[in-house]
Amino acid sequence: MKKLVLLCLLFLSACTSVPSGVKPVDDFELAKYLGTWHEIARLDHSFERGLSNVTATYKMNSDGGVQVINRGFSDANKAWKEAEGKAYFVDSNDIGHLKVSFFGPFYGAYVIFELDRADYQYAFITSYNRDYLWFLSRTPQVSEALKQQFIAQVKQMGFAVDQIIWVDQQDQ
């Protein structure tokens, strides 16, 4: 039984770790990161499949954590889909490495590895492995140069750039 508990704890902590070769940003300022972000690109996952106009909104919780509201329009159902979660820093609150949960006690890593440090206008995020990738922006559209920067950086880091989905951010 002790081995099973230890194995479960090891698995759960692995889900909040940083993938090898990825470094979370330092000098991170949560207050500047709060607010609404538009999803520009992502790798496909069942929980976002078929969604357009995806946003992520971050607000402070009274317990010092962050409320996370992900919202997107389901083209198939012609309806909005929303998920609410919570996030907490894994280590120091000036490192862009948080753990996020949308269900129960299970957390996954939220690793900000690239960030517009001047104005917090864009961010590149992964999770505990390279199967997860997001490109967020404060605006629903970004320049072609920023898209190319994203592709070049994540390709160099070993992400599957041929599987990236560019999110439709048209008005509903």
Image (cartoon, grey):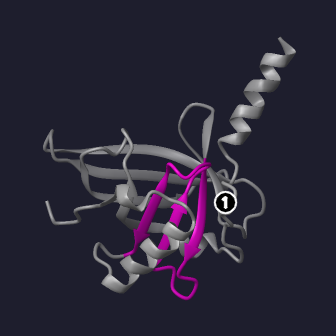
The residue sitting at 45% across, 60% down in the picture is 134
User: What span is in magenta?
Assistant: 109-138
* 75 lies left or right of 40: left
Residue 157 to residue 120: above or below: above
* Quarter of image, res 64: bottom right
For the image, the number of numbered tags is 1
Packing grade of label 1 (10 A; few <14, some 14-19, many >=20) is many
Q: Relative to residue 119, is residue 127 depicted above or below? A: above
Provide the residue designation for mark 1: 97
Q: Secondary structure at mark 1?
A: strand
Horizontal side, residue 126 vs residue 53: left or right = right
Quarter of the image for residue 45 reads top left
Give, as a three-letter code, the residue at label 1: His
Q: Reply yes or no: does residue 134 show up in magenta.
A: yes
In the picture shown, does residue 33 fall above or below 20? below
Does the stretch in magenta take in 62? Answer: no
Seen as rendered, the residue at the extreme bottom is 118
